[in-house]
Image (cartoon, rainbow, N blue to C red):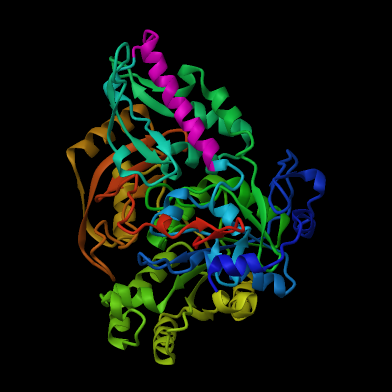
Amino acid sequence: MTDIEIANAKKLLPIEKIAKKIGLSKEELELYGKYKAKIILKNNKSNHKGKLILVTSINPTPYGEGKTTMSIGIHDALCRLKKRSIVALREPSLGPVFGTKGGATGGGYAQVVPMEDINLHFTGDIHAITTANNLLCAAVDNHLFQGNELNINPETIIFPRAMDMNERALRNIQIGLGKNNFERHDSFVITVASEIMAILCLASDIQDLKKRLGNILLAYTYDNKPVYAKDLEVDGSLAVLLKDAIKPNLVQTLEGNPAIIHGGPFANIAHGCNSLIATNLALSLSDYTVTEAGFGSDLGAEKFLDIKCRIGNLKPDCIVVNATIRSLKYNGLCPKEALNIENLQYLKDGLCNLEVHVKNMLKYSNHVIVCLNKFNTDTKKEINLVKNFTQNLGIDFEICEAHAKGSKGALKLAKKIINICEEPTTFQFLYDTNDSVCAKIDKIAREIYHAAKVKYEDKALESLKQINELGYNNLPICIAKTQYSISDDPKKLGFPKDTEVTVRDMKISSGAGFIVVYMGNIMTMPGLSKNPAYKKIDINDNNQIIGLF
């Protein structure tokens, strides 16, 4: 059965029953049909704070390796063990859903549902973010048209338009064509890479959201002074558009356990974590909160730990590093056609990628466990090879079969996580935000990417000068780079050492509160593949969606 067939075969519980499991009343919900709801945020804050479990991964393959599936499986297993648990995940972007990667609601018997709703329009959060983003862009161009009272230099406008779709034709555009218009160059980013998405995910409440929106750097004047969204008096309207989007979404797993899904920044472009509001809410309502960070630990986990944990005063009680036999062989340069065939040599060659991710996570926390997401093509010899390698690193190891068996396939892993969480936890950030911008970039490049040198292009140095002049040099760093390698080159698989990484440019995300550093040839607006997923997605005569994975 396909994922959507498995999901559709399950009878869902009314969302009020799911809410009751975590102590929420019907009055604390805004219903979006029978199986989805917004949680109404209250000013009173609970003193209760559960254990935080972060699920991350080795460098992924283009095929997806089941990190979300594992997160859901761990959560369901904790619930089966009679623990009060919540899984807090990101919202899927329509770009990948109709592109190559597909949806992001788990798989097999470890899914969040209703999966078709979540993967498509859900509760409209991403649409609201897109609209807010483009209202701000419209306000900028309207200001230029109406006389440009703020003296904005159009050539310095740095805030792009957005849409939640892979659309390479919009990467670079010319706008304002025609009579009585102000013609200029512009661009689009995918919504999940926009600063407003990052702001929503890092804001603590609606007041903080409004303040951050007002602090978005838009452009510079002709005499090189910064222009912010609040200067256009548009921050109030932006907040109004996001007043519902800031509320976390409550859904359920296939096993009827609570799931909070909210926010969805990409990790290879943005910071790759669900909203801080959702995570804190889950921690206040549960004894265990399972969350994930996008792509490999060099991207999502590093940003979760150095940005989100810093801003939100969080610390993980356990870090789970997800790996698959297939992805390890891929990192061992195994040909695509042989990924599902036993080959110990390719596997051995790829184990270095697991090693680097484990050792990187140990730089933050003493509580790291490796979990192998088991596929039915994995052999005993391959599994034992990974197990022995991991244990020789001094790291605990377990197998997860949540995709095929649901919570029963993750029970052993959940029990080990419970035991780990009971032990004293150490946690530290990788860098001090008071370090110089280059020192912070250098620390990430050397300690996480294991690069020998950081090269700065002229454009990056010009941006660095502006960052220092405006006094934003004490912000944390959010590096945009490829997800397929710990380096900035997607072709360098495994564990490339002593490489040179190149900083092409930097951008101040003053509203979000970090500096985006662009490495390698990373695109903020993805394109569609030759055979995108939209070719397989359809709706049948019974009004059922098919082909959605």
Q: Which quadrant of the figure contains the N terminus?
A: bottom right
Q: Is residue 174 visible?
A: yes
Q: Relative to residue 454, is residue 342 depicted above or below?
A: below
Question: Does the magenta segment cover residue 327?
Answer: no
Residue 444 location (% of width, % of height)? 34, 54
Q: Residue at x 70, y 70 (%)?
A: 79
Left or right, 84 with respect to 429, comes to: right
Residue 96 location (% of width, % of height)? 42, 54
Which of 196 and 405 lies nearest the eye of the viewer? 405
Q: Residue furthest bottom?
A: 381
Q: Count the marks: how many?
A: 0
Which of 45 and 38 lies nearest the eye of the viewer? 38
Residue 334 location (% of width, % of height)? 27, 77
Question: Does the magenta segment cover residue 147?
Answer: yes
Q: Residue furthest front?
A: 541
Which of 295 and 530 lies nearest the eye of the viewer? 530
Q: Residue at x 21, y 36 (%)?
A: 459
Which stretch did the figure color magenta?
A: 126-151
Q: Relative to residue 246, is residue 449 depicted above or below?
A: below
Q: Is residue 424 visible?
A: no
Residue 354 location (% of width, % of height)? 37, 73
Most frequent secondary structure within the magenta stretch: helix
Q: Residue at x 33, y 25 (%)?
A: 157
Left or right, 186 with respect to 391, comes to: left
| Quarter residue 221 falls in | top left
| Quarter residue 71 falls in | bottom right
Q: Residue at x 44, y 60 (%)?
A: 536
